[in-house]
Image: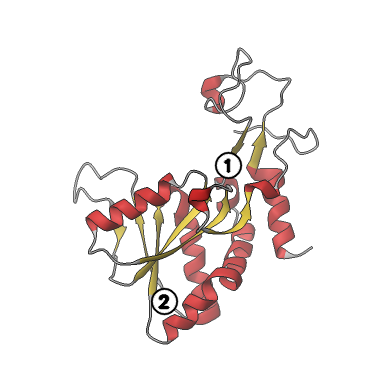
Amino acid sequence: MSNRDELKKFINENVIFRANPEKQYNENYIGGAVPNNIGVHHGRPWQVFMRRLTHNIDMMDIVGDIMYEEFMKPYADHYHYGTPFQMVGLETGSLSIITHLQWTLKISAVLDVNAFTVRKERKSYGLFNYVEGIPTKDKIVLIDDFVNTGNALRFLNHVIKTELDEPEVVGAWCILKTDRPETADVKSIFTLDEFDLEYDPDIYWEPV
């Protein structure tokens, strides 16, 4: 089994939750995205739990290798010729990915690539900051785990524009994305339409 197939199998069996259409769910428990306790659908009958992937060291090693081969090599080559870049993402969804990509670039291309994260809300004490880390003026690649509507990437662009000295955003990478027009420019390992989202009792699991 190839790395890509192994990663896809893990996502299919461990990351995508499909609601059992014959089971009633408590709306507070499942967040209202699948049938609630009176059997009414609120939105989609599935959810994506990416932390089950990004907190798995073996799967993240595979993610780093695939992203390096498919996304990062041109940036790494340009870096050697004096065009450095840095990575940034929302801290909740991107931190473990960024850490693995930094390590992959260190091992595969001998590059020390800067990175920083953005908070969802401005800190309410201390520096009252959005940004965690030390941004530079280098070009930026946005990082996320799952890009659905693109709202997180738009928020990142907004913070970069308003809080920093407007470094240029040159790309966006993620593990999984939906096939929407607003995510067309995002490079992803997989798109959601590569997976069967119908309930399957053979791979069914409950969130914890």
Whole-angstrom CA distance, mark 1 to mark 2, is 30 Å
Residue 108 left/right relative to 201: left
Q: Dot 1: what SS?
A: loop
Tell me if label 1 and label 2 are in contact, CB under 8 Å: no
Residue 36 lies, with reference to residue 187, above or below; the image says: above
Extreme residue toward the top, this view:
38
Residue 131 seen in the figure? no
Amino acid type, label 1 = Phe
The circle drawn on residue 152 is: none
Q: Quadrant of residue 64?
A: bottom right
Query: From the viewer's perspective, is residue 125 above or below residue 145?
Result: above
On the image, the x and y values in percent for residue 125 come to: 20, 44
Query: At which x and y percent is residue 187?
Result: 54, 61
Residue 186 in percent (x, y) is at: 51, 58
| Residue 6 visible at all | yes
Query: Label 1 crowding class (10 Å Cα cut-off): few <14, some 14-19, many 20+?
Result: some
Name the mark on residue 112: 2
Nearest the camera: 60 or 145? 145
**Rendered residue at 56%/71% (across/down):** 68
Q: Which residue is mark 1?
A: 49
Q: Disc 2 on helix, strand or loop?
A: loop
Horizontal relation, residue 45 to residue 93: left or right: right
Residue at the location (51% across, 77% down)? 74
Q: Earlier in the sequence, mark 1 or mark 2?
A: 1
Name, please, the residue furthest toward the bottom. Answer: 81
What kind of residue is marked 2? Asp
Q: Quadrant of the N terminus?
A: bottom right
